[in-house]
Image: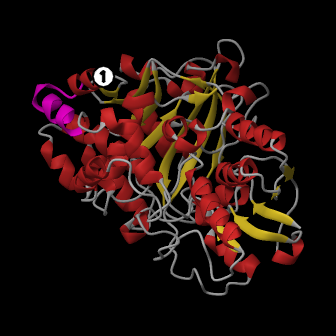
Amino acid sequence: MLDAVIVGAGPNGLTAAVELARRGLSVAVFEARDTVGGGARTEELTLPGFRHDPCSAAHPLGINSPAFRDMPLDRYGLEWLHAELPMAHPFPDGSAAVLSRSVAETAASFGPHDAGTYRRLVEPFLPKWDALVRDFMALPLTALPRDPVTLARFGLTGLPPSTWLMRRFRDDRARALFSGLVAHAIAPLGGLATGAVGLVFALAGHARGWPVARGGSQSISDALTAYLKDLGGAVHTSYEIKRLDDLPPARAYIFDTSPTALARIAGLGSYYERFRYGASVFKLDYALDGPVPWTAKEARSAGTVQVGPGSRDIAAALRAASREGRAPDKPFLITVQPSVMDPSRAPAGRHVFWAYGHVPSGWDGDLTDAVERQLERFAPGFRDRILARATAGPPELAARNANYVGGDIACGAVSGLQMLLRPKLSLSPYTTPHPAVFICSSASPPGPGVHGMSGHNAAKAVWRRIRAS
């Protein structure tokens, strides 16, 4: 009998497997697709030689992840590559606000009225970032905070809606950039703890940047897999699980899946019936014959570029997708240009580029024209650079990854109480009514992102259960 079986070979499932194997447990991972990776994959989606990330591409949470930083993943080929600027937010006049590794440079890009405000907002947390990130990404209620005073101060600042926090800024340059940071959660800006979302992304960028993985996001998954195999763990691909009986006997079963799939496979009935899935995205991957012709020079040297003229535009786009059930006419875009940092991702002189806008769950329309019109506003001539494109709306995203129910790439709405209490109100969020079944996907704390911490935390819960039995 195995000690632990993990269902799903995404970053969280692989991290959970590694953590248990490091403790000497026998572990096997089962993945429905023919390769590992989940939301961290790399494929030739457009033309030969153009290597795209179908989902996650830039990794501010990955490079800052306590779980990943405690593993020797560099020995297994993981290398972080940085652009000159982690992120840029261009404006219609050709200028841009930036998220730089330097707090001073970032603050200066907002203008004189808000430079000091921004410094006062982030500088108290930055020196204590490593302790802070461990505290708010740790196993809830079972790990004592390393720095409870800083964690409490962060909570007081971040728990209110981001719209409250942004009242501190006088000009819209700072509000627009911060709104874009919050929008990574794919939820309205006025929700609970949305201020914390923006702060986390800003602090992560200042602390260690927003890098890509050399060769693509698949490198993260491949490094975790190679490390797991060296620890004695096994990985089985092309192995779809429909019920627990499809798996070998084990002391624990850990699911890197949606709560819906877990309940169906493990026979938990309506246990997760109140779990909510959120809005989706419409994603485009481009093969380009040259770099994106951004008007703002800062955007040309940034790894990630946020495209939305102002905070009101961003709020309206998110509201349309999340609450009004329609695709926005002028979508807010999150874009990543990996080949700015990693030329190996495309043939010489060519580039790969990634963009998505927000749409309602399950939306089956085509946002391509709206996305490209928005890009042309900030990068005139963009369409002339396109060699090929691959599009994926909610149905395609859900077909590629079963965790993305309705195309929700966050594996559950990041809004309301579910922002903090996922997948349901519980003092032990990784356990289920079945004593041998656990959840470790992004539906569990600390939530979405390629950081492995949901798997890390779930592995601790499994280890405690096994040790006590």
Q: Alpha-carbon neighbours of circle 1 within 10 Å: few (<14), some, or many (≥20)?
A: some
Vertical relation: 117 (above or below) 458: above
Which residues are the magenta region? Answer: 109-121
Give x and y (percent) for residue 377. 38, 31
- Identify the image quadrant of residue 338: top right
Question: Relative to 444, does residue 158 appear above or below in the rendering?
Answer: above
For residue 315, say whether it is visible.
no
Residue at image location 33% in from the left, 47% down from the top: 147
Give 184 or 211, whichever is nearer the viewer. Answer: 211
Task: Please give the name of the residue rendered at 66% of the width and 65% of the height, measured from the top-left corner.
Answer: 462
From the viewer's side, name the closer residue of 442 and 26. Answer: 26
- Give the residue number, with chain letter if any, for mark 1: 94
Q: Position of residue 366 (x, y in %)?
A: 57, 53
Secondary structure under the numbered disc 1 in the rendered image: loop
Picture quadrant where residue 222 is located: top right
Q: What residue is rendered at 64% in x and 37% in y? A: 71
Which quarter of the image is occupied by the C terminus? bottom right
Total residue callouts: 1
Of residues 322 and 459, the one nearer the viewer is 459
- Viewer-nearest residue: 90 or 364: 90
Q: Tell whether position 111 is magenta.
A: yes
